[in-house]
Image (tube, rainbow, N blue to C red):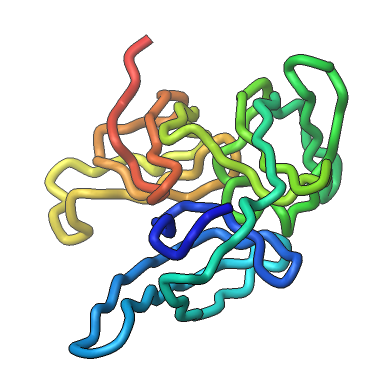
Amino acid sequence: MYTASDLRKGLRIMLDDDPYIVVDFQFVKPGKGQSLYRCKLRNLLVGTMVDRTFREVDTFKPADTQEKTMQFLYREGDHYNFMDTESYEQIHLLEEQIGDAKNFLIENMEVKILLFRDRPIDITLPNFVDLVVAEAPPWIKGDTVSGNYKPVILETGYKVSVPPFIEQGEKIRIDTRSGEYLTRVKE
């Protein structure tokens, strides 16, 4: 069991028989009375955000979740298929469950799948992923009107702004948390 003093960002707890993750946390000590813990929580099943205030005496059960390392196999329509790297069992997630992670998934990539009562509910990508530039417009030397970046399309269909020297066929590193270009990858 957790107490309110154990609350911190990223902690998964059970509230009203649903798993929640603490997104934001604030400790408040008023002049009189007991301490309060203001939290912003995200429901891991439906994605809704909730603001709740807890007292020091409140207790919580840990969320009944587990994380498994899985390998992304392929996409079939709006289904994304993954394989457990230990048991070779396959599961699929819908495009709505994947969210923005679909922009960075490439075949054979290892990801962490969060399971709640053996049901997949969330995906965690590696912080950085290397992707090939599928389409890049040519850069015109001396073109300072458009700035120092140009838009390119990656192998997954994701559009990102990169420096003008990046060309089609090159591999670049993307930060999956922000979706931004980091560097060119030398092979």
Tell me the residue at 53%/47% (across/down). Answer: 158
The number of callouts visible is 0
Which residue occupies the extreme bottom position in the image?
32
Instruction: Give the vertical position of 109 relative to 136 (above or below).
Output: above
**Residue 102 versus residue 99 in the image, above or below:** above
Q: Which image quarter: residue 182? A: top left
Q: Position of residue 73 (x, y in %)?
A: 76, 26
| Relative to 85, 106 lies left or right | left
If the image is split into quadrants, where does the C terminus sit?
Answer: top left
- Tell me which residue sits at (49%, 80%) in the image: 51
Image spot of residue 131 (x, y percent) = 49, 29
Asked if 167 appears above or below 42 in the picture, the reply is: above
Identified at 76% across, 15% down, the residue is: 86
State the residue in front, 67 or 63. 63
Side (left or right) of 104 relative to 184 = right
Instruction: Please provide percent x and percent y for residue 109.
Output: 61, 24
Farthest top residue in view:
187
Q: Position of residue 147 (x, y in %)?
A: 18, 56
Which residue is at 81% across, 46% downward?
117
Q: Taking 171 as reference, is 76 left or right?
A: right
54, above or below 12, in the image? below
